[in-house]
């Protein structure tokens, strides 16, 4: 009898636990299913977004290559239009590259001021320092062709102050423009800074040495002795 009672109690206990589990399932099941669905939607959405980004990057790359082909074929105006479209859509690096290519196309058309403005736009938009400084230096070269020495100096000084590989090209441009403007000491200082920099590119350092040889070291300052031991003239007291 005792065994039958224990079996009965155990069966009742199991049914009570089952009822509780069913009640909890009814109460919390929809929330759990909702959470699971949210996770699944998030995962699927992330995969979709990743695939979309890859597709967009591929399309941008193909369009970019087609615009470059137009430019190489001599269709600068059509290329500039294509690059303008690409500069406003797609991954950021492609947009910046498109701005720089459009600036080159505008330069090929002879619109130097618009080209400078587009290089400035690319430099402002670039997050990569190499792309940014490339755009800034290209703009500076165009400024050297269209504006005065002060404008060039204003452009290149920030690049020089950053002390990277672009700094030496900026120094060289400053030296050449200073030379043409008659600012010989500025030119010598810039060229000397290149020749004394151990990490300057060899080609840039060699050009600086040649340019210094052409410019010359500058007028030597007359040495003034601190004391002159001259013999007294007749009748003069020491």
Image: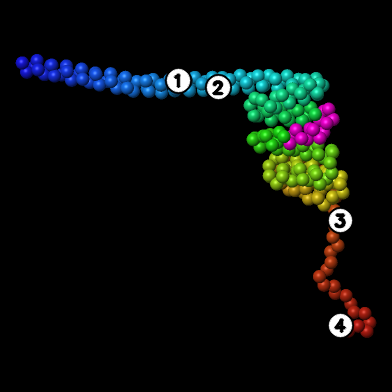
Which residue is labeled 3 in the image? 219
Can residue 218 be seen here?
yes
Q: Residues within 10 Å of mark 4 (few under 14, many from 20)?
A: few
Residue 155 screen position, x and y as percent: 76, 43
Quarter of the figure with residue 137: top right
The N terminus sits in image quarter: top left
Q: Nearer the viewer, mark 2 or mark 3?
A: 2
Which residue is labeled 2 in the image? 49
Compared to 212, does 86 lie above or below? above
For numbered disc 2, what is the local secondary structure?
helix
Q: Residues within 10 Å of mark 2 (few under 14, many from 20)?
A: few
Give the residue at x 78% y 35%.
116
Can residue 209 be seen here?
no
Give the mark, 2 or 4, whose residue is nearer the N terminus. Answer: 2
For numbered disc 1, what is the local secondary structure?
helix
State how far apart marks 2 and 3 are (Cα): 67 Å
Residue 154 inside the magenta-drawn segment: no
């Amino acid at each position: 009898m005792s065994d039958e009672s224990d079996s009965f109690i155990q069966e009742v206990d199991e049914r009570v636990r089952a009822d509780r589990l069913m009640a909890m399932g009814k109460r919390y099941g929809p929330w759990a299913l909702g959470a699971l669905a949210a996770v699944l939607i998030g995962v699927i959405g992330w995969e979709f977004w990743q695939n979309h980004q890859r597709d967009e990057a591929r399309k941008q790359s193909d369009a970019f290559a087609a615009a470059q082909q137009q430019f190489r074929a001599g269709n600068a105006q059509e290329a500039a239009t294509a690059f303008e479209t690409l500069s406003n859509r797609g991954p950021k690096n492609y947009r910046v590259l498109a701005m720089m290519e459009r600036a080159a196309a505008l330069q090929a058309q002879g619109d130097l001021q618009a080209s400078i403005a587009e290089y400035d736009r690319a430099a402002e938009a670039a997050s990569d320092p190499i792309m940014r400084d490339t755009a800034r230096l290209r703009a500076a070269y165009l400024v050297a062709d269209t504006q005065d020495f002060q404008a060039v100096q204003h452009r290149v000084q920030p690049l020089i102050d950053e002390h990277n590989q672009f700094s030496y090209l900026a120094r060289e441009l400053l030296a050449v423009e200073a030379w043409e403007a008659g600012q010989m000491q500025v030119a010598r200082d810039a060229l000397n800074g290149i020749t004394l920099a151990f990490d300057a590119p060899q080609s840039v350092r060699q050009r600086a040495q040649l340019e210094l040889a052409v410019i010359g070291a500058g007028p030597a300052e007359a040495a003034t002795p601190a004391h002159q031991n001259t013999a007294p003239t007749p009748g003069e007291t020491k």
